[in-house]
Image (cartoon, rainbow, N blue to C red):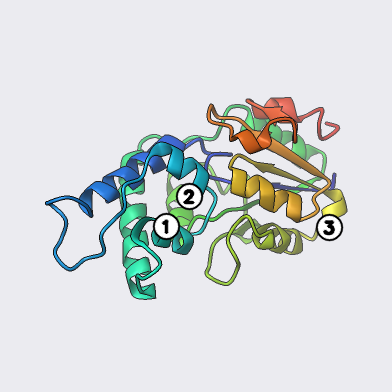
Amino acid sequence: MKTVIFDFNGTLFWDSPYHNEAFLEQVRLHSGDGAVPGAPRARHITVQDIREHIMGRTNDQIMRFIFGEGITDAEVDVLAREKEALYREICADKTCFAPGAEALFAALKDAGITFGIATSAPVENIDFYYAHMDMEKWFPRRNVVFADGTLRGKPAPDIFLKAMEVLGGSSESTAIFEDSAAGLMAAEASGAALVVAVDAGDLPPYASGRFPVITDFRQALPLLGL
């Protein structure tokens, strides 16, 4: 492999419970008797809904799933910012890389393999991670591709194809690490030579039997020939 691309949320940072908490809190704020009059109303969602219809997708897709297709672009923006602020508040003192991740980064660096991130997270969250984690040590900002509104959301492969372009790689020599069903579909659709499913305890059924599965990034070393 010449290039390795990592999803971030749920892959390099095992933060799915924090996102779940933020989504459920937002739904509580926008439903029932306590909802703001005239504001968009949230549908009831479960953690299973989050896993199947939300994780790995863009905030535009997510907010329209929760609040309905009829909300305006301006409402999408306000609601997405609200949810991400809730999320950052929840996990501000809980940020750390997934087990074995930094050992894998060091091995990739020693082997001269280019690696970066392709994430559906907005730029405000990227700034948050750089402020709270040892990101700069491993990932120059130029090697991070994020949801800037110009790319289709997963399961479309756009963000991975863009990351390959940014990193100077090709699908035939790229490995992708993902955790969500939508992300794994997008990784497959990109034509990547190797797709690895990362199991933080809530691996989607879609991954079963389709991809190598790791629970610690040190397990990826032999998969990458390191």
Kindly identify which numbered label has been placed on residue 190.
none
Q: First in sequence: mark 1 or mark 2? A: 2
Q: Amino acid at mark 3?
A: Ser
Q: Is residue 98 left or right of residue 85?
A: right
Q: Is residue 7 visible in the rendered structure shown here? A: no
Indicate the quadrant containing the N terminus: top left, top right, bottom left or bottom right. top right
Residue contact at pointers 3 and 1, CB within 8 angstroms: no
Q: Which residue is mark 3?
A: 170
Neighbour tally class for label 1: few under 14, some 14-19, many 20 plus, Cα within 10 Å: some
Q: Mark 3 or mark 2: which is in front? A: 2
Q: Which residue is mark 2?
A: 54
Q: Mark 3 or mark 1: which is in front? A: 1
Measure the C-alpha gap from mark 3 to mark 2. 28 Å
Neighbour tally class for label 3: few under 14, some 14-19, many 20 plus, Cα within 10 Å: some
Indicate the quadrant containing the C terminus: top left, top right, bottom left or bottom right. top right
Question: Front-most of 65 and 119?
Answer: 65
Q: First in sequence: mark 3 or mark 1? A: 1
x and y percent of residue 214 in the render?
A: 68, 28
Q: Which residue is mark 1?
A: 65
Q: Mark 1 or mark 2: which is in front? A: 1
x and y percent of residue 52 in the render?
A: 51, 44
Question: In the image, what residue occupies the spot 72% across and 37% down?
Answer: 196
Question: Front-most of 181 and 172?
Answer: 181
Q: Is residue 206 left or right of residue 122?
A: right
Q: In which image quadrant can residue 36 be found? A: bottom left
Residue contact at pointers 3 and 2, CB within 8 angstroms: no
Q: Amino acid at mark 1?
A: Phe
Question: In the image, what residue occupies the spot 58% across and 39% down?
Answer: 11
Q: Amino acid at mark 2?
A: Ile
